[in-house]
Amino acid sequence: MIIQTLIFLGAMAHVQGAFVDPGVVFETWRGWGTSLAWFGDVLGGFDQGVQDEIINALFSPAQLNLNILRYTIGGTTPGELVCGEFRPGGGTESFKDGPDLPFNWNRDPRARKVLQAAKAMGVDTFEAFSNSPPQWMTISGCSKGNSAGGSLHANFDPVNASQFSDYLTEIVNHFHTEWNLTFTSLAPFNEPSSGYWNGASSAQEGCCMERSTMMAVIQALHSSIGEKGMNYVSISVGDETEINQELLTQETFTESGIANLYTKVNTHGYSDNGRENRAPLYTLSKKNGHALWMDEVGWQASPQGDMTQGIALAERVVYDIRNMNPEAWVYWQVMEDQQPWAWGLLDIPYTDPSIDAIRYNSGYHSFKQFTKYIKKGYKIVHVSDSNSIAAYDESSNILVIVTVNIQGIVRAVNYDLRLVASSSTPTVTATRTSATEENADLGEVPLNGEFEVIYNAPPTSITTFLVMNAVLSDTLENLLVNGDFESVGREGWSLLYGDRDDGAINGNYVYTGSLSGYLDFAPSELSLIQNVTVPESRTYYLSARVATSSLRAVFGILINGEQGRELGVGVSRGYEPYGISFYAAAQDVISVYVYGPRGASNAQIDNVVLH
């Protein structure tokens, strides 16, 4: 019945061809996660049966399968609400109430209970982070921010950087030595440049800082970790609200010479006004030797049947992973109170919690389409459809494809799997979430004679294909010379319609490495091109990262001088992945090119692979 439905829908949809190339690897996946702020304190106070139900829903491999958990090191002194009430759980208890007072290791018991329960369920990656220093260290005396402090509402004096760093490292070390839970990373601030945290009008912990203050904290924290011999933990920064802000912060830290003091870049994804800055943030992170996480974003809840939250989440996951290459993706709060403003993937009435009252929102089921199947250690690999991501595990020969249809009509797509069908035929099964389905099992999906999945995605749906017995092809050698442009000079590449002193290969705007193809179209039309003679008759697969500020830049191929497929390059979106598959006979000459007409600004190309 499912197969018949797929076939009947075919006449209603325009088919888009796509291919998966596991030989083009973007990142090794570290996992999916959430932050315990602010729900950990609330969940840990529920009846045990409700706790167990929710913890299972979030962390069980059979359910949401989250393996990353971020824990808030609190800054609020219990009973001293000097600037008003907090939202439930929004004022995490500090472990120390003054400079001359001892640490109180009985604090924050409910969130710590959830943390340990998640570990027992299989969570294996823990990060500690601070929303605010202890209130007694802040300028205002309030862990919700500062009503003064200028437009930024800055609330931390760098003179206290060493004291704050000692506070953080003592807590992290206590968890490690006394409570058998190891944080492998520590983030000392959260949305510090936002200007949001202004004291009484805020409902949760937060602290804004100047970038110079952040740098003082990073330096002090690095010293504290070293002095205490805590080689199991490293520093993560800067947890800015938006990608644009994060890029500015990382550029400042790089120019100031402190980027070597931390190992991971965390960014939040609110407002989504940094689409053009995802690739530059990735490039800078790689240049500095940093890992990159999308570690906070969220959307207002919508119940199953209303796919607003689910589609927004799924679309962003795909866009982030395709265009920013994070190693992990973390939702803000997966659990919230049942309130109209709440963002939870699941929610429950905080005043009257019960198992029956738990509501699983559309975002929960949408997220599960990714989190249950793309596991830690899988490689994120190239798929040429812009609405899909793919992950491959060579040890188990498993390929996962997740595709999102944000449209209100059926969307058809074919996936060419020949590059994982070299020695045997893969088997494909599928699950789907839509307005009428909650992670529904679609059973086995047939392959045609060309090893293609032929699929029609219903409106506003997320579909996961699990490809078993996906054995890599033995034809994964790059047929292009200098596809990463890192060789000296223009080796392998030629210019048509003009010549330049810079050879059209330079470091002006790279994706990875030190060099990329860079074409300035202002003086004349220009094409950067490479010719290759293919060795055998078969289908070939071309992929690259391309960026442009031009409306007319294209990426394409010629076959024996005749026009082949050509793709328009998205304008001012930074480097994005592009892919072209084509059939060629043995000894055909394939010309791979990027081209733009005169006056069309510029374009860049990097990491070009032909399999």
Image (tube, grey):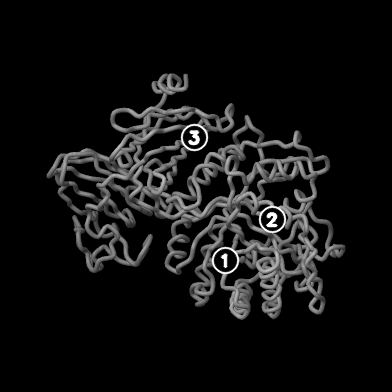
The residue tagged 1 is 236
Nearest to N terminus: mark 1 or mark 3: 1
Label 3 neighbour load within 10 Å: few <14, some 14-19, many 20+: many
Q: Amino acid at mark 2?
A: Gln
Q: Quadrant of residue 75?
A: bottom right
For mark 2, give the secondary structure: helix
Q: Amino acid at mark 3?
A: Thr
Residue, x 61% and y 58% (percent of image)? 241
- Of 464 and 407, nearer the camera is 464
Separation of residues labelled 1 and 2 (CA atoms): 22 Å
Q: Amino acid at mark 1?
A: Ser
Residue, x 79% and y 63% (percent of image)? 107
- Of 525 and 399, nearer the camera is 399
From the top left corner, tell me how far across and down residue 367 is, in percent. 57, 42
The residue tagged 3 is 463
Q: Is residue 212 visible?
A: no
For mark 3, give the secondary structure: strand
217 relative to 539, above or below: below
Separation of residues labelled 1 and 3 (CA atoms): 33 Å
Q: Quadrant of residue 422?
A: top left
- Is residue 560 rendered to the left or right of residue 419? left
The residue tagged 2 is 116
From the top left corner, tell me how far across and down residue 581 is, in percent. 28, 41
The reply to whether discs 1 and 2 touch (Cβ–Cβ < 8 Å) is no
- Of 608 and 278, nearer the camera is 608
